[in-house]
Image (spheres, rainbow, N blue to C red):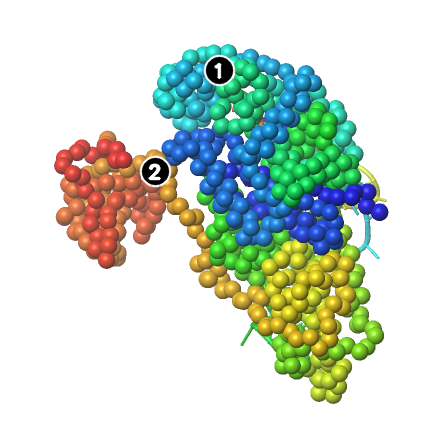
Amino acid sequence: MEKFERLLVTAALPYANGYIHLGHIAGAYLPADIYVRFKRLCKEDIIFICGSDEHGTAIEISAMKEKVTPKEIIDRFHNANKQAFADLGISFDIYSRTSNDIHHKTSQEFFMNLYNKNLLTTKSEKQLYSEKDKRFLADRFVEGTCPICGYEEARGDQCENCGSNLSPLELKNPKSKISGDTPVVKESVNFFFPLEKYQKELEKWIKTKKDWKANVKNYCQGWFKTGLKDRAITRDLDWGVKIPLEGYESKVIYVWFEAPIGYISATKELFEAKGTPDKWETYWKDKKTKLVHFIGKDNIIFHAIVFPAMIMAHGDYILPENVPANEFLNLDGGKLSKSKGHGILVKDVVKAFNPDLIRYTIAANMPENKDADFSWEDLQNKNNNELAAILGNFINRTVVFAKNKFDNKVPEHKGKERPEVFKYIAEQKKVVEDCINNYRFRDALNEIMNIARAANKYFNDSEPWKVIKEDKAKCGEIINDCLEICHTLAIAINPVLPYTSEKILAVLNKDNSDIIWENIGKPCLKAGSALGENAILFPQLELAAAKEEEPKEEDNLITIDDFKKVQLRTAVVLKAEKVEKSKKLLKLRVKCGGREKQIVAGIAEFYTPEEMVERKIVIVDNLKPAKLMGLESQGMLLAAKIDGKLKLVGIDGDLPDGADVS
RNA sequence: GCCGGAGUAGCUCAGCUGGUUAGAGCGUCGGAAUCAUAAUCCGCAGGUCGGGGGUUCAAGUCCCUCCUCCGGUACCA
């Protein structure tokens, strides 16, 4: 019935300039993985493609900052992210990288295809060129004096001091960030993709996509409304895919153009490894392939508009059938992005928790329609009240019963009919299918859990612990039913909780030959066969433990910019007196430059007021004022403390008050 | 500034093109049960759907306005 014969699923290529965090997982990778695992259970022909996006300015800048090669940066993040995905059970068929030769070739072919059709336009623009570096300097490779505020370290694209948006040509005294060389202005020719030309076709195409999520369609509408603009597809950069034309040696293909082609390159690589190097074409060229891009909402423009336009221009490849984009995941209300220090990195969190618990918590609260919240408390509640109580408990009570009363074997089931609960399970199977096929993973998970809820109800209502006293065979049938439901649960939860699925099989001492979606609700166990060793699937988590185990960012290093926020200054104490009724506080009047301020400091146990007067100290000048014992403190002084002893930080030699400390 | 999204039970979220008593999960409370990881099962309670105004026989759902939060984009050059 299905008009598609095979599926090609992609998940956004993570940028190899940072570690992936839970927000990424919730946005694209987990929904994609659930979808793919489900389809695999349904025995559909499906491949799941991903890889690292490894080019672009940001990576080159990171490399420069760390004084390493870009290769070192991308290797670091590629390997770390690949491992993190694997640990979380994200089951890509291939996790490739755009630095591979095959990708460079594929991108260049794509570029040449458009070039040969005369689809690309060129535009010449004035750019800064460094003779010494022998290259044009991209915005962020230039530093100079801001023409607006006079700040001397303004970047080519923006002045961090006054916030102005700049172009490198506006900077006074521009310098190359690479060599310090003074660049000259030179004309640079770049290629442009005529996105504008494809607007009509794109609009028409998207209109036919009735089942796309509203957020995706709305977002596209917004872009159509303002009008699509042609986009530069080459850049004056070193790190990237070279342009296969003479005279463009110092340029590369712009990363936004080349990265999505990575899906194609990775597919080629996958089938090359499988020994069927031509087979990738079926997946990218046959209209009977259903292409689905899983992405976060920040990527909608590229997957719903730009890349499809590129494909239209190219002509050989299929367009995506759907682009399910999720919103963002917030942490305790705050943003879950690294920039705000809220990132929960996958590599850390998989060390502290059962990957399935993470998958469950995120899936149960997936940001499908709007930004959602993640909290550690929620993680704990989900573990204890849902996974342990409903799912884990059912498996456990069933297996323990079989172990104690039936010699740890599957009891016989002589009755022809299975109880009502099996009908319900068969219905749920369809409900879950419907949810997943429509990318409603949160609902899907709830419906799957409803099977476990029904299972517990069946156990309760059947009261095997009573029945066994009168009719052991009848009781055996009940337990047989429950064991079969355990196996069914192993199938049903498999897309979301793959590790738990395996654990259930181990407990049942069953291989995975019957882990097929069609087998949901069907008896698969052999009467009389021995069960395995029981295991607690989800041990209780304590809130305190959940908080303690909260993984910290490995590097709590701060940048020089972070440090610069703290204004440290020397000050001299003018007056000092004890704060009444306080053991620890001294009220100080200090002079700092031309200003005086009051600082309430917790040093009374170590310094008398008399000792403090006229003393030179170091203070945090821009600390937000706070009230201590009703007195306002307009800063804090620096002191070192160890083993209960406290010593003020002083100045070496003589220095006036008000001096900057750094 | 402009554009878009969001504001629904204690918490996290569903509510399609307006239409019977606004839903789910978890939590709370009451009861049943005791095979099981203080786990299960049954039941009750909880919302004037951000504020205000309007359209309509009828609005969480449409229109206007205001408040709060989040994105995008522009300008301040």
Q: How crowded is mark 1: few (under 14 residues within 10 Å), some or many (20 or more)?
A: many
Question: Which corner quadrant of the image does residue A590 belong to?
Answer: top left
Find numbered disc 1 in the image and state the secondary structure of the residue it sits on.
strand
- Mark 1 — residue? A127
Q: Which of B3 and A321 is in front in this view?
A: A321
Q: Is residue A260 visible?
A: no
State the image coordinates of residue B53 (x, y, percent, origin top left).
Answer: 71, 39
In this rendering, is residue A447 above or below A331?
A: below
Where residue A10 sits in the image (x, y, percent)?
A: 65, 41
Q: In this view, does A285 lie to the left or right of A59?
A: right
Q: In this view, does A231 lie to the left or right of A179?
A: right
Q: Give me the residue at 52% from left, 21% from top.
A: A251
**What is the x, y in percent for residue A653?**
14, 36
- Please tell me whether mark 2 or mark 1 is closer to you in this view: 1
Residue A563 disc label: 2
Residue pictured at 58% horizontal, 47% vertical: A25
